[in-house]
Structure formats: structure tokens, C-alpha cells
Image: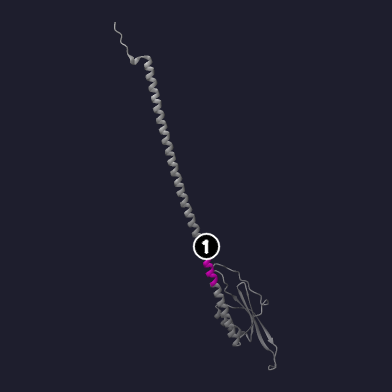
Amino acid sequence: MNFTVNLLHYPALDRQRRWRHRWTTSLAGGVVGVLLAWAAVQWVASYARQIQQEQQRLQATLSAQKKQLQSLQKQQAQHKERQQQVQHLQGVAQQHKAWEVLHQALQREAREEALQLLSLQLTQGRLALHGRTSNLHSMNQARQRVSHELGIDLKLFSALVTSEPPDQSKRQASAMVEFVWQGDWPMPRSRAEKIALEPSSPLAVKPLP
């Protein structure tokens, strides 16, 4: 009688074989898991570095744009300040020229004995001239000449006929016309600026220096 023994199906050897297979499989799975975890960590670290670099790049770009904006705003402020200074100087030059023209015109009228200036006043862009002359006709002609020279519309605010005390060469008092002219005066200001002009009282006149 023959007996055949299959060593592969021997219980002890079979258990040992299955145990080795499970251990090898578990070890391989662990190694693969560790490798996958390491690769994931490396990928996350690389992605985090990319995000950090992108944030730094964006911050640098934002900082550069902020500096450019500040520089532009500074240049605009300086340009606006220079424009205001130029406008102010132009206004001052215009006013100085107007005073010079007024002085020359009044001197000419005084030399020609067309009128006698008593005082003038400048209040909030409003010019008031107080003077006297021999009659209304000569006063109107002088007002038109001075207005033309100044380029300002001088209007007659008030007129009063008075009598001048007689001197030794005259037997009776001569009549005089005392008047007040008013007109807008160029002020050193920008074109966009608007200043309310108020008429000055003819009684509140100041003597000329």
C-alpha cells in the first residue's frame, strides 16, 4: 500500500507560508504608504513654497504700485501748488499794473484840472474814488477817460453840488460837484475763485497818503 505525502499542504508549513506572505504584503504596503505620504508631504511643501513666492511677488507688485501712486499724487500736488502760485503772481502783477495805470490817469486829470481827487478806498474788490470837479459834464468826461484807461467800468455812485468859499480874486463862491465813483477792482485770486463784492459807503473814505 503506497502513501503519498504532499509537503505543500502540510499544515505547519502552510501556516508559515501564509504568515510570510502576510508579513511581506504588510511590509510592502507599509513601504508604499510611507512613500506616498512622503511624496504628499513633498508636494504640499512645494505647493506652499509656490504660494508663498506668489504672495511675495504680489506684495512686491502692490508695494511698487503704491509707491508709484504716492509719487504721482505728490507730483499732482506740486503741479497744483505751482499753478496756484503762478495764478497768484499773475493776479498780483495785474493788480500792480492796474494801480500804476490808475495813478497815471489821476495825475493826468489833476494836471488838466479836470478833477481833484480827495480820497480812495478799496473794500472787498470794490474801488471807490471820492473827488470833486467844476461841473457834471467835466466829471463825466473824466470818469469815461479813467474807466477807459483802467478797463474798469467806473459808475457814478453819488454826486453833490457844493459851493467853494470865495478867495480874494473872486467876488462870489463857485459851484463844485463832489462825486463818488465805484467799480470792480482786479484782485489777486484764481479764476475759479469768486469773491462777493460789496459797495463801500461814500462817507467811509480814507485820505490818500
Q: Which quadrant would the N terminus be assigned to in this image?
A: top left
Is residue 172 depicted above or below 67 in this figure? below
Q: Which residues are magenta?
A: 81-89
Q: Is residue 2 left or right of residue 208?
A: left
The one nearer the camera, 146 or 90, is 90
- Report x, y in % for residue 109: 59, 85
Q: Amino acid at mark 1?
A: Ala
Residue located 38% across and 15% down the image: 12
Secondary structure under the numbered disc 1 in the rendered image: helix
Q: Which quadrant would the C terminus be assigned to in this image?
A: bottom right
The one nearer the camera, 155 or 100, is 100
- Report x, y in % for residue 164: 69, 87
Residue located 58% across and 80% down the image: 102
Residue located 59% across and 87% down the image: 111
Answer with the quarter of the image where residue 141 lies: bottom right
Q: Residue 87: within the magenta? A: yes
**Residue to which mark 1 is pinned:** 77
